[in-house]
Each structure stands twice: as C-alpha cells, then as structure tokens.
Image (cartoon, rainbow, N blue to C red):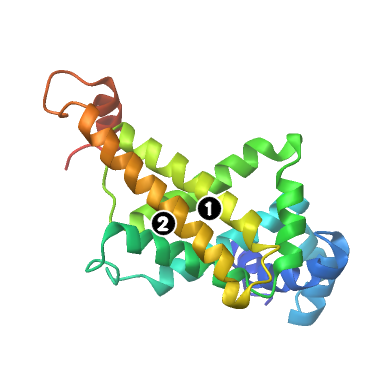
Amino acid sequence: MDDLTLDALRLALAPKIAEAAAFDGWSSEALANAARELGADPDVAAYAFKGGQMSMIGAWIAYVDTRMEAEFAGNTLSELPVRERIRRLVLFRLECAAGFEEALRRALTIMAMPQNSARSLKLGWASADRMWRLAGDIATDYNHYTKRAILAGVYAATMAVFVDDTSDDKADSCAFLDRRIDGIIRFEKAKAKFVRSPDEGFSIARFLGRLRYPAN
C-alpha cells in the first residue's frame, strides 16, 4: 500500500470505505477503519481524502467506473441494440452497489445537499459519459449533451429506487429502469423526426462539437 499513488490509494480504499460507511457514515471513522483493514498509513489516507465526504463518495464512484470499463472493454456490447447496451451498463453499476444499499442511501443524501450539487452533477455526468462511450456513442453535436443529461437523470432516479427495493432480485428496480430506458428511446425517435438533418445548413451545436472533438 505504501507504494501506491494517491489516485491508486483512493481506488483501493473506496470499497472498504463504502463497507464502513453503512455503519459509520461517510466519515473519518469509516476512512480510518478502511485504512487499518488494508494496512494503509492512516495519515496518508486522510491526506488522500482531504476533500471529506464528497471525496470519499467520488472515489467510490470512480471505483465503480473502473470496474465497469474493465467489464465491458473490447467492444463486448457492439452486437447488442443500443437500448440493451445502456441497460446492461446501468444494471452492472447497480450490481456493484448490491449489499451497499445503506452506504448508497447515505451517499445520495450527502450528494443532494445544496453545497454538493455542482460536484454531484459533475460526477453523474461523468458516469453517464462513460456509459455512453462504452455503448459506442460518438455524437459530437448537441446529442452528445442531451444523451448524457438524460441518462444521468435516469441513473440517479433508478438508484433512488434501488436503495429501498426489497423485491426479489431487485425486480422493481429493473422494471423501473426498463420503463425509463423506453422513455429515452421514444424521446430519441421523436427528436429524430423533428430535428433537421445535420447536413442542412450551419449548426452552432455541431460547430462546438467539432471544436471539442476535432477531426483527425
């Protein structure tokens, strides 16, 4: 543990902090318990998470992001319809949180605090971006932003259902997610009918997208 970078240390400690957070909350006590369990220097661990609760929660989210990217690397979703790609990605993230419902509940409460809203939105956007990229999305116009904003909202709403879901195999959460994904697909189809072709005239959204991802 002494040879890890701070970023690697945060990822290593994140799941252990989440385990402790079910009892101690996202607190210095949870961090200290996680450090002791993994044999990390408690002072170094405290420094790594000097950002406090949101730093710990952010590390847990980054840990799940890393697991998701490893699980679905190599275009493993490429043969599936887009709807199923997104469904599998969200369900995988929920499976990573299974058994950590109390920690997740406490994390969602902290993230909903006004002082944490900007950081929470950024974290949600980043996770949605990773999901869309793994799903094969390469949009660079306004679709890049609308897809991520909508998915971030769907994911957040599904987590809120998940933490209190006592149905067998989280069936209620799965059904909730399916309904929300169906809504995304309907929205995208309706949008395609009313938005003119990107080849028709100048588009400021497309122009900004090209600045963000310049052509090779």
Q: Is residue 51 visible?
A: no
Choose between 44 and 139: the one closer to the eye: 139
Q: Which element carries disc 2, helix, strand or loop?
A: helix
Q: Name the residue under label 2.
A: 131
- Camera-near label (1 vs 2) is 1
- In the rendering, at what x and y percent does residue 38 appear? 74, 80
In this picture, residue 92 sits left or right of residue 134: right
Q: Can residue 204 be seen in this view?
A: yes
- In the rendering, at what x and y percent does residue 132 appear? 37, 53
- In the rendering, at what x and y percent does residue 93 appear? 52, 66
**Amino acid found under the numbered disc labelled 2:** Met
Q: Are marks 1 and 2 in contact (CB under 8 Å)?
A: yes
Distance between the Cα atoms at labels 1 and 2?
Answer: 10 Å
Q: Residue at x 57, y 55 (%)?
A: 158
Choose between 157 and 8: the one closer to the eye: 157
Q: Which of marks 1 and 2 is nearer the N terminus?
A: 2
In this picture, residue 83 sits left or right of residue 64: left
- In the rendering, at what x and y percent does residue 170 appear? 59, 71
In this picture, residue 61 sits left or right of residue 41: left
Which disc is residue 155 wearing? 1
